[in-house]
Image: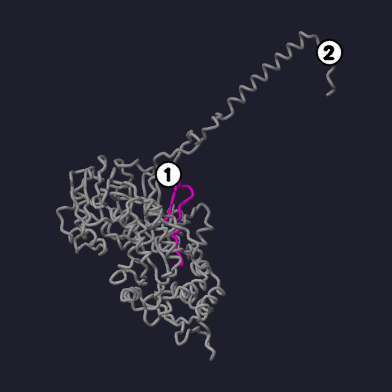
Amino acid sequence: MGAMRPFSFPMKKLRWQLLIVILALAAIALILLGQQPNVLPPNVQNTPQPIAGGLYTEGLVGSPSRLNPLLDFYNQPDRDIDHLLYSSLIHFDERGIPNPDLAESYGITQDGTTYTFSIRQNARWHDGEPVTSQDIIFTIELMRDPNMPVPQDLRDLWNDIEVEAINDSLIQFHLPEPLSPFLDYLTFGILPEHLLGSLTTAEIVDAPFNLQPIGSGPYRFSQFLVENDQIVGVELIAFEQYHFPRAFIDKLVFRYYPDSQTALTAFQNGEVNGVSQITSDVLPTALAEPGLSLYTSRLPQLTLVFFNLDSPRHPFFQELAVRQALMHALNRQRLVNEVLGGQAILANGPIFPGTWAYLDVDELPAYDVDAGIDLLKAAEYTIPAEGGDVRAKGDEFLRFTLLHPDDALHTQIAEIIQSSWAQIGVEVELEALPYPELVEALTARDYAATLVDLNLTRSPDPDPYPFWHQAQITGGQNYAQWDDRVASEYLEQARITLDLTERARLYRNFQVRFARELPALPLYYPVYTYAVSSEVQGVRVGPLFDPSDRLSYLPQWFLQAVLGNTPVP
């Protein structure tokens, strides 16, 4: 096309063509404008807005027993279901901070001995009856009953506490002395007095109620799924009268499987949308599975090596340099990587990471074999002139027996510890014991060193008092017999201090003291891996105080959504 010459057309005709062009452009603009999405203001964005509906099915590893919160202490699958069926006065978030559940509010007297709770007026049992103070008192009376199979320490605590119903919605707890971790004991699931109050404890244990439970949680029991006269699953329905906003997912189905592999196969076959636990043996397969999201959270467990600091046969454990040298010689990361498949976090001390009281201390001796040898040399432990591999100071040889649980995992860990300490001239004999015998040896203080797991499931409060205070050396759980006045004072003050900030300061001081004195060698905190279909939205899993806590935010999960405008902060 050649260049247009100027003024080659009369002005009138040019104006007419310009008018046609302008009208055409306007028409095109209108068409394009109609085809474009709405332009949102810069401080607003389109985000999915959850709506109610759908079915979520989870493969639950284990088998059912009784759906009763006072009978589920020793059956994890029951606790998982009960977590959704029942409510408690309060619950703890993933940082270990208490939040009201059935309690609308609570107050504590200045001396820390009286706790008053107000129960929500809209709290209802799944049969529509109101939740009252009498339900709470009834449940506590059951925990006091020696015929009810609850942990003895729980029964002992409630036997020392007076409980008083001021009215149907107001309840008080009177403690004999201040105990700041008391809220920890109020997370028990509450049972309905109007349905069970006429039964004896023995009748409650075997009552039909346990297979047709009535709770006050976000989901209500619908039915068991039965195939070939065997219970293969349980169905739950969102509770419309729940005291918090109704759960988004209408229906939950939990199907029981004997192990993680079988449950994962069920996901691959489209039978379930999630797997309650991904164990290390199936982790590689689960990681490679398309459409499956994995969530890993810290468990409330600590694996460590206890030393008997008051053993007359092994006085060298009282020397800090020896304990530090033993810590230097441990390649804990190797344990985590090679033995645990990466499914653990290196431990700093007795307080769990992710909680409000945790301090990431840098006082622990790092892996350094040469540094360990230097510490022993400085403490005058040398290889005898007559030869050998065991260091000694005079006639005191660095030689002792390490007890460990009699299973494949702990045996492998113990063998690595044994070879690690041999590198610095410490001779260790291994002795495997069944766990009950191991606990018996700890209780009798009849040991030199022990590899053990501390399981603090269902104990969100970080209180380390039972294991490390001086008063627990005799008759308590201070198995290391750590007699440290400075550490004990921190723990004493923290136990009677209600202010969370001050408690955190005291516990952080304690953690620094622990890391410097090393009364035991912290190894690792194991983790829990949970799998959910990528199609499920809103999934959130924080650090766990019980594997059932992975379901704490399930009422906020959703399968269906619409786009909505959300302000951008």
Disc 2 marks a residue whose amino acid type is Ser
Taking 108 as reference, is 529 left or right?
A: right
Q: Say which residue label 1 marks.
A: 558
On the question of residue 261 being in view, the answer is no
* Measured Cα–Cα span from mark 2 to mark 1: 69 Å
Taking 116 as reference, is 533 left or right?
A: right
Which quadrant: the N terminus? top right
Look at the picture and state if 256 lies above or below 418: above
Residue 165 horizontal/vertical position (percent): 18, 47
Q: Say which residue label 2 marks.
A: 8
Tell me the SS state at disc 1.
Answer: loop
Taking 552 as reference, is 165 left or right?
A: left
Confirm whether the magenta stretch covers residue 568: no
Taking 153 as reference, is 321 left or right?
A: right
Looking at the image, which is closer to me, 542 or 315?
Answer: 315
On the question of residue 82 being in view, the answer is yes
Residue 544 horizontal/vertical position (percent): 40, 56
Q: Quadrant of residue 105?
A: top left
Look at the picture and state if 511 lies above or below 317: above
Q: Residue at x 43, y 57 (%)?
A: 358
Q: Which residues are magenta?
A: 522-543
Disc 1 marks a residue whose amino acid type is Phe
Tell me the SS state at disc 2.
Answer: loop
Q: Residue at x 40, y 72 (%)?
A: 306
> Tag on residue 460?
none
Look at the picture and state if 171 lies above or below 527: above
